[in-house]
Amino acid sequence: MLKSITCLAIALIPMGYAGAQTTPKAADSKPYAFTKGLVALTGSRYGREAIYTDPLAYQLYSGTLKQPTEGAVFGTDEQGGGIKWMAVTADSLNRLRLRGGFRGNGGAPAGPGVVAGSLRGGIGGGGGYTYLTYPSTRDQIALLTIKGNSNVYVNGELHMGDAYSMGYLHIPVKLKRGLNEFYVRGVMITANLSFPDKPALLSTDDPTLPSIRLGESNASLQGAIVVINTSTTSLSGLQLTSKLSGKTLTTAVPVVPALSSRKVAFMFDGSGISTKGTQSCELTLTQKGKSLDAGTVSIEAVPAGASYSQTFVSQIDGSLQYYAVTPQSSAGTAPSALFLSVHGAGVEASGQARAYKAKDWGNLVAATNRRPRGFNWEDWGRIDALEVLAIAKNRFKPDPQHVYLTGHSMGGHGTWFLGATYPDKWAAIAPCAGYPTLKEYGSADGVIPTTSNDPLEQMLLRAGNQSDVLKLTSNYKPLGIYVLHGDADRTVPVTYARQMRKILGESQPDMSYYEYPGGSHWFGDESVDWKPLFDFFKWHKIAVDSTVNDIDFTTANPGISSTYRWASIEQQMKPLLYSRMQLNRNGKAITGTTTNVSLLKLALNEFAAKTPLTLTLDGTPAIAYTTISAQDTLFLRRENGQWQPTQRPDAAQKGPHRNGTFKEAFNNRMVFVYGTRGTKEENDLNLQKARFDAETWYYRGNGAIDIVADTDYSLPTYAGRGVVLFGNATNNAAWKQLLADCPIQLERNRVRAGDQQWQGDDLAAYFVWPIKGSATTSVAVIGGTGVKGMRAALANQYFAGASGFPDFMIFGLDMVRTGSKGVRMAGFFDNNWKLTPEQYSVNSQKSGRE
């Protein structure tokens, strides 16, 4: 069983460094702590954007990287000075620390107040690399545990890093006989190797577990832990048996690919537990009846009325997630209220729920954002919040007019964001110590870049518009808003609350604002559990649709948010630019204006059948329409400046059900499909990239992915599931099934997009395409025209919360060195999934027009 890796004070000095130590003993069995290495401040820049620059990665990919030695010059900085490799040694906490006060940040921009920059150079101050070596006496498998890094190249293979120093990311790696090199993106790290003696391990330091609620059945509960495959072949036919208070249950475990890990669900029976407190659950991993490993997890038993955790299967990826509840203190006869609370960075949902005293008029539910840091309540964090909201509504059956949203810090941002994105879901919102937008407040992944004069950069930046709360403030008008912020907050300065008070001051009809005197970022549970806040909630309710005759709603992406009450923005003229509808329903007339809307849907269920209506939009001639039924829905399309009734669009078109952007395909229980029909180097890189993305998804999103070879994939077998395809048409056998009709074609040494074509082995592409025969699922392609191109596609900052990616982007290896100058083409498909010049931009310096 793997619980943690002990740090031993064994010196390690890179080859070429004066005084290099002797080779370790032949029997590598004890954990090995890296205590010496080299650091270069390479200026690598990653962030919440589609572009990254990394001078070291570029040299590694292009075969020009020289083995580091102390004092050797790696390159030049922005001022023209030399970047040198500097020796680092471990401090008392085993951190490989560069002296002189420099603080590492994993190669990511620093925290609050980071200034947004151009896509050409990235954002923030850039990062560095730590170089380590390990001389192995033989070929062997090791577990690598690093804390404080964004990623690591192990003998050239890229793996995820533990950017938040959580300590639970243990990566199986294959060491070769002789010198093994580690290029770690991060400074001030800790790094260790351990040497497993089993083909599979149970890692119990990152469980997902429910509470045992005393007085309930508890006979069929579900938890999840990590299984690590330390062998060079896939492990199948695994079973996980739980034993708790004498009761056992056995669960089949999905396939775990070679040299990888997977978080797997297991069943346990808690019905034998009758006392509160921590309970030990024994777990045994077996294959064909043979025990491979065993471990123990601690499960909390709580009395009735106490806060508790509940697990559920997420439809994002089929993994097990949890939410926490502080139940209502007393049961009433009338439906209760529901409070959704969204936590701050580094906070568990269980801790968030416990910060609130039970209310006598409602249940409080805390979602997870998939991790304590997760996705800033955007992207998959947003979906997690909606999944938990739906589960809570189904379970607690609240009064539909009394649903509220609140959160603290990053959750304060989540409150601003979710409140503006889904204003019809809440009676009132209460951001506490929150920042409104990631365009102004940066965390480990930096800020979202702001503007650019370059048309291609503008196209890339547009993909992040849905995150800019400041452009969505008109959506708050139907809501009550309570703003709570400590006036001495140094983590999220009170200026953010004052900014929103000023912006909303003249337009927001219902807002209460309080600065807690002397309050820091967290001044006790009152930072969230503030009585005036809940009193404010109590006298707010969601109006019923029949009483709402005025609509003012803005969205940047109908695939994220399209509907307010009885009207919906179904399609846009220009994808992901802001769309707005301002409508009035008066008697038998609907009038209003729209911006960037090409298809509008109106629910007419407030009108009886055969009711004649008049609709006037944007000053165009009035439309006469008679309702067909009491549940009628009308679609209106704008063409050539005129609005006309139209049929319900075909599901094959874009719409709220599937609107594109590259990241949309990472949903619907997606499966990773890697190519095996290329050269050995191509095939290895396809699998390595799939494994790297799975590691990242696990670390950032507590997720689990099915990774399958292209030859094992078929549309019927994986019907209804999203796909992420690694490779190209030449080396991935699943390409024809999924992408034969796509206007973007990627193959060995060539990429074609409409009438644009580029050749060479150093080109890459990210793009999305609808899966034929499905109304909701998509395939995302991550591929290159050759090994160099695929390496350019390795970075996966699309998992950074709120990072913007359009429908497609084509770029070269030179992007890793020059930023957006290396992008060939980027943009969006139109509403019929066609390439039209109005919706994309081509680099004029590198046009591929035929």
Image (spheres, rainbow, N blue to C red):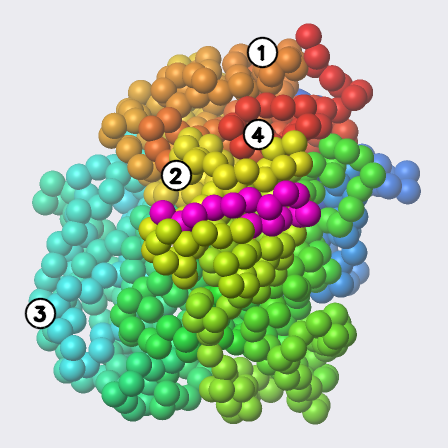
Which of the two labelled residues, at mark 1 and mark 4, occupies the earlier sequence position?
1
Q: If the image is split into quadrants, where does the C terminus sit? A: top right
- Element marked by disc 4: loop
Task: State the residue in front, 433 or 56.
Answer: 433
Q: Which mark is residue 246?
A: 3
Label 2 – label 3 distance at C-alpha: 45 Å
Which of the two labelled residues, at mark 2 and mark 3, occupies the earlier sequence position?
3
> Badge 2 is on which residue?
776
The location of residue 779, given as percent across then percent down, is 43, 31
Task: Classify 585 as above or below 41.
Answer: below
Which of the two labelled residues, at mark 4 and mark 2, occupies the earlier sequence position?
2
Given the image, on which type of amino acid does mark 2 rest?
Answer: Thr
* Residue in view at x 45 percent, y 17 percent: 741
* Residue in view at x 63 percent, y 19 percent: 762
> Badge 4 is on which residue?
829
Given the image, on which type of amino acid does mark 4 rest?
Answer: Phe
Region in magenta: 615-628
The location of residue 259, given as percent across then percent down, is 37, 37
